[in-house]
Amino acid sequence: MDTTRLKDFFTGLQSRIVSELEAFDGQPFRTDSWVRPEGGGGISRLIEEGVFFERGGVNFSHVTGKSLPASATAVRPQLAGRSWEAMGVSLVLHPRNPYCPTAHMNVRCFVASKEGEADVWWFGGGMDMTPYYGQRDDVVHFHRTCKDALEPFGDEVYPKYKKWCDEYFFLKHRNEQRGVGGIFFDDLNEGGAGGESPFERCFALTQAVGNAFTTAYLPILAKRLDTPYGERERDFQAYRRGRYVEFNLVWDRGTLFGLQSGGRTESILMSLPPVVKWRYDWKPEAGTPEAELYEVFLQPQDWAV
C-alpha cells in the first residue's frame, strides 16, 4: 500500500479545508502536533471562540498498533492477532449561530497485517449535517452535493450510502435521528465496473467525498450567518447539541475505537460542542420551528430530488 500517497492526500485535504475555514471565519486555527506512544501521531487544527465558529476542529492522524481493541475485533473477528495502521482526516464544526448547522466529515483508510497473509484493508468515511432550525434548501444542497460527488462511481452508490448514513447516525436509545444525514460508508475495498483496481477505485471515491465537503457546507453557512437569533434559539441549540454528545459517546464507532486503542483523548473528543444543555422529558410546543425540526427534518427522506 502506498502510504506516502495516502498521507499526501490526507494532509493536503486538511490544509485546504482549514485554509477555507480560516478565510470564512477570519480567525486562525491553532495547530497542535502530537505523537502517540504506541505508534504514530497526528496534527490537530482547532478553533475555539472564533468570529463565527464557536468550536471546530480538523484532525489528521496516522496511528499504528500491534493488536486491535475489542471494539474492532468484536465486529471483525478475522482481524484478531493482526497489527494495524489507520490514517485519515476527521472534522466537526459547531457554529455559534443556531441557524447554521453543525457538520461532520471523516475520510480514512485502515490496514491490518499479519506475517504470511495478505493485508486486509478498507476505506471509510462520509459527511453529515445536523441543523437546529431546518431549512429545506440547505438540506437539498447538502445532499445534492453528496450525490454529485458519488455520481462517477455508479448511480446506486449515493442511495446506498445515504441510507447507510441514516441508519448509522441514529440514536437508538432516543429512537431519533441525529440530524438530516448525508452519506456514510465503511469496509470499502471493492473494484468497479470499469476494470480499475479495487484500491484505485476506493481511494478515488474517498478523495471525492473529502474534496466535496466545503462545497456542500460553506454555501449554507454563508447564506445563514447573518440570520438574527436570541436566547430562545441558543437555548434550543444547546439542548439539541446534547443529542450530538450522546451519539458520539454512546454509539460512535470511531470514538470508541480511538479511546480503546489509546488514541489522543483531546483530539478524539474535539467533536464535542462547547455549550450543551439537557432537560428532563422536554417536548417542543406544537406549531413551533423547534417542533418542525422533529416532524420534518429528522425524518429520513429523499432530499436530493
Image: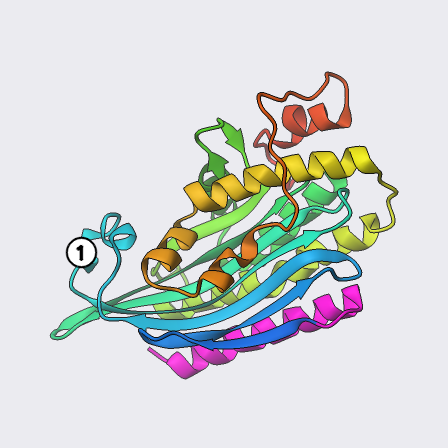
In this rendering, is residue 47 above or below 141? below
Judge whether residue 3 is colored magenta: yes
Secondary-structure class at tag 1: helix
Please, which residue is most extreme toward the top here? 286
Is 44 covered by the magenta stretch?
Answer: no
**Is residue 193 placed above or below 170 in the rendered structure?**
below
What's drawn in magenta, residue-wise? 1-28
Which quarter shows the C terminus?
top right
Q: Nearer the viewer, residue 115 or 280?
A: 280
Give residue 41's quadrant in the image.
bottom left
The x and y percentages for residue 242 are: 58, 38
Going by the numbered disc 1, the residue's amino acid type is: Gln
Question: Residue at coordinates 38% horizontally, 79% vertically from top-left?
Answer: 3
Residue 51 picture location, percent across and down: 80, 61
What residue is pinned by disc 1?
78
* Residue 74 horizontal side relative to residue 13, left or right: left
Q: Is residue 179 visible?
A: no
Which residue is at a point 62% across and 41% down the rendered structure image? Answer: 241
Q: Residue 295 placed where, x, y %?
A: 65, 23
